[in-house]
Image (cartoon, helix red, strand yellow):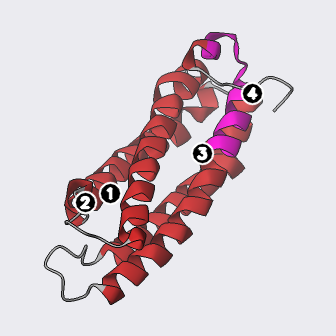
Amino acid sequence: MSDQRIDHLADLPQTSPKDLIEHILARYHERHRQQLPELISLAEKVQTAHAEHAQVPRGLSQHLRRMLRELDNHMLKEEQILFPMIANGAGAMARGPISVMLTEHEEHNESLQVLMTISHQLNLPVDTCSSWQKLYTGIGELKADLLEHIRLENEVLFAYALK
């Protein structure tokens, strides 16, 4: 992104689509690609160490792996197809790919709901280990980041492209 950064949503009206795309790539795509492998590793550690605990988030590492595959596939489509179309001003031609992305965003929201169910709405048992605490903190950050990522694309970038 050029010298400007998008530090606050109030900056969006003055942001070009190319700068918004660069912001999304740097702030969200790169971050998700870091977050999910770290969370998978923590989930495996917690599930193994606390396998007998009644509140262990069973199936969490598998669900996070599925989310990583789906999200990575989604982001690649954006990076290779949709974002270049938008950056080059091909808004009308982007209608089909945007429709696909909107559907996938709904699926990501559903995956987040499953994630919250598996992780007991991020309610930690009493006296949990630091890994379990770090895992749930990370899941909370992933959820917030992914929801904001989806909102920026749906409400700002895609709306601009379809003008």
Whole-angstrom CA distance, mark 3 to mark 4, is 14 Å
Foreground tag (3 vs 4): 3
Asked if marks 1 and 2 touch (Cβ < 8 Å), the reply is yes
The magenta region covers 11-27
Do we see residue 24 in this rendering? yes
The relative height of residue 4 versus residue 40 in the rendered view (above or below) is above
Whole-angstrom CA distance, mark 1 to mark 4, is 28 Å
Q: Position of residue 40 (x, y in %)?
A: 46, 73
Chain-order first, disc 3 or disc 4: 4
In the picture, measured across the screen, residue 29 lies left or right of residue 103, that is right
Q: Which three-letter amino acid code belongs to the residue tagged 4?
A: Asp
Chain-order first, disc 1 or disc 3: 3
Chain-order first, disc 2 or disc 3: 3
Q: Residue furthest right?
A: 3
Chain-order first, disc 4 or disc 2: 4
Look at mark 1 in the image and give the residue it sits on: 111
Q: Specify the label residue 19 is tagged with.
A: 4
User: Residue, x 45% and y 57% (percent of image)?
Assistant: 138
User: Residue, x 53% and y 33% (percent of image)?
Assistant: 153
Whole-angstrom CA distance, mark 4 to mark 2, is 33 Å
Q: Position of residue 26 (x, y in %)?
A: 70, 44
Chain-order first, disc 1 or disc 4: 4
Look at mark 3 in the image and give the residue it sits on: 28
Q: Position of residue 101 (x, y in %)?
A: 48, 44
Q: Residues within 10 Å of mark 3 (few under 14, many from 20)?
A: many
Report if residue 89 lies within the magenta region. no
Q: Which three-letter amino acid code belongs to the residue tagged 3?
A: Tyr
Main SS of residues in magenta: helix
Q: Specify the label residue 114 is tagged with.
A: 2
Q: Which three-letter amino acid code belongs to the residue tagged 2?
A: Val
